[in-house]
Amino acid sequence: MRFLPFCFLAALGCLPVAPATAAAHWRAPQSAETAPAASEDFERIRAAGFDALYNLDYRSARAAFEQLVKLDPKHPAGYLDVANGMWAEKLYRTRRLQATTYAGETFFADTKESFDRDFDRRYRAAIAVAIQVADARLKENPRDAVALYHKGAAHGLLGAYEATITRAFLAALSQSNKSVALHREALKSDPGYIDANLSIGLYNYVIGSLPLPVKVVAALGGVRGSKKRGLALVAKVADEGRTARDAARLLLITLYKREKRYAEALPYLEAFTRQYRANYVARLELADTLMRLGRVAEGIAIFEQLAKDSSASAYQDAIHYQLAEALFSVGRAEDALPHLRAVMTLPGANPDLATLAQLRLGEGHDLAGRRAEAVAAYRAVLQKPNAFDSHARAQARLKKPYISPAAAAAAEEAAAEEDGESHP
């Protein structure tokens, strides 16, 4: 089910978040009375935390979310927000914050990545605390919509982690099923809890995206979904949601882009970047979307501005890589090479991106007819740890020089025509 992790990544994959915090030492309260609605202070602090989070002010976001736990230790939101921050910062550090960086089959390729056992332990502990706090409230009131929602969101975050970090896709599916079931219960308890539609909408979209034969088998097991209904539910949260509104907008952007409905994604992206002006990751997505709409000059201009932006210095490896990819896409491979070299030489650059840049550098040399330089680049890739499908691609390029997708398509079409002429 290779479509599933993409959707999880889409859900929260563009969210910049607070740095990881050691949540494992927190303990849920021993009992929980039916809690009143969150106080005005709680909502104000949480809103400030999310505002900082979307503006890449990690320290302020972390402080706000930790303050929520102290302010109301019987409310699961603070614990959940901290866990969300831990996971999303992990995506940021591994440069998986953007779904477009590792699009398509590359995401699913076998790779010998190091597994961060310490982070895994701390993250799972943080999720467990959020679930424990929600369970304490549900013990007192099984119809507590707030507890049902946050418990469902905790399972959803764990599913997203399984999909994007451990890439345990069956475990991700199991967690997502729990999330959807709990959010449906939350809506039964409180039909006005709009945020709960987000996971249900995503679930509908995923099931609706299944190939027809698989969809038929799934329907026999009682699993049904609709892409149209899924998009409509996500849009409902994007327009009417409470705390999940911005997450829904980002998910909607990614789903629209997946559907190649770039013109519909653009207004959401423009609004988001206006609201959160410090969010350079969202501006990368804006540039990519403009490129896909054929507004090449505007897209390249944003990429180039970001490459010079000192406030985005921590993300320059991803910025240069995305700019290089954009230049490749419009036939300017030679102009892309300096940006690929920048990725490879930047201090502290993400190793996966550096390897992919080396591979792309070889492809650029191939396009320019510099076969010796291309071969050297591919061999260098094979000396590095395998990053996604980099080794397989490098080995293929050593056997046969890289040609552009347009040239490859033209060659296939010519071969098909020739085969048709030889077999009247």
Image: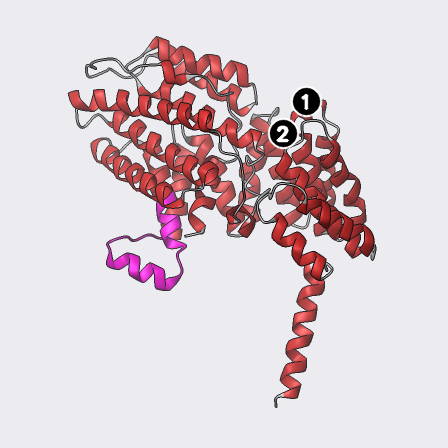
Task: Looking at the picture, tell me which residue is in the foreground, 90 or 214.
Answer: 90
Q: Name the residue under label 1.
A: 311
Q: Which residue is drawn at 62% across and 49% down?
A: 391
- Classify 10 Å Cα crowding around label 1: few (below 14), some (14-19), many (20 and above): few
Give the left or right position of residue 255, taking residue 169 as reference. right
Locate residue 172: give its quadrant. Answer: top left
Looking at the image, is 296 positioned above or below residue 78? below
The reply to whether residue 332 is in sight is no
Disc 1 to disc 2, C-alpha distance:
8 Å
Looking at the image, is 148 positioned above or below residue 98? above
Q: From the top left corner, tell me how far across and down residue 108 is, in percent.
A: 50, 48
Looking at the image, is 407 positioned above or below residue 79? below
Q: Which residue is drawn at 68% across and 33% down?
A: 317
Q: Residue 30: within the magenta?
A: no
Q: Are marks 1 and 2 in contact (CB under 8 Å)?
A: yes
Task: Looking at the picture, tell me which residue is in the foreground, 72 or 302.
Answer: 72
Magenta region: which residues?
A: 202-226
Q: Mark 2 points at which residue?
A: 280
Q: From the top left corner, tell me how far across and down residue 344 is, in percent.
A: 72, 36
Q: Quadrant of the C terminus?
A: bottom right
Q: Count the labels in the image.
A: 2
Q: Residue flagged by tag 1: what amino acid is it? A: Ser
- Classify 10 Å Cα crowding around label 2: few (below 14), some (14-19), many (20 and above): many
Task: Please tell me the numbered disc located at residue 383.
Answer: none
Q: Residue 221: within the magenta?
A: yes
Q: From the top left corner, tell me how far across and down residue 208 is, in percent.
A: 37, 54
Give the left or right position of residue 128, taking residue 165 as reference. left
Q: Which residue is drawn at 30% across and 17% down?
A: 75
Locate residue 160: give its quadrant. Answer: top left
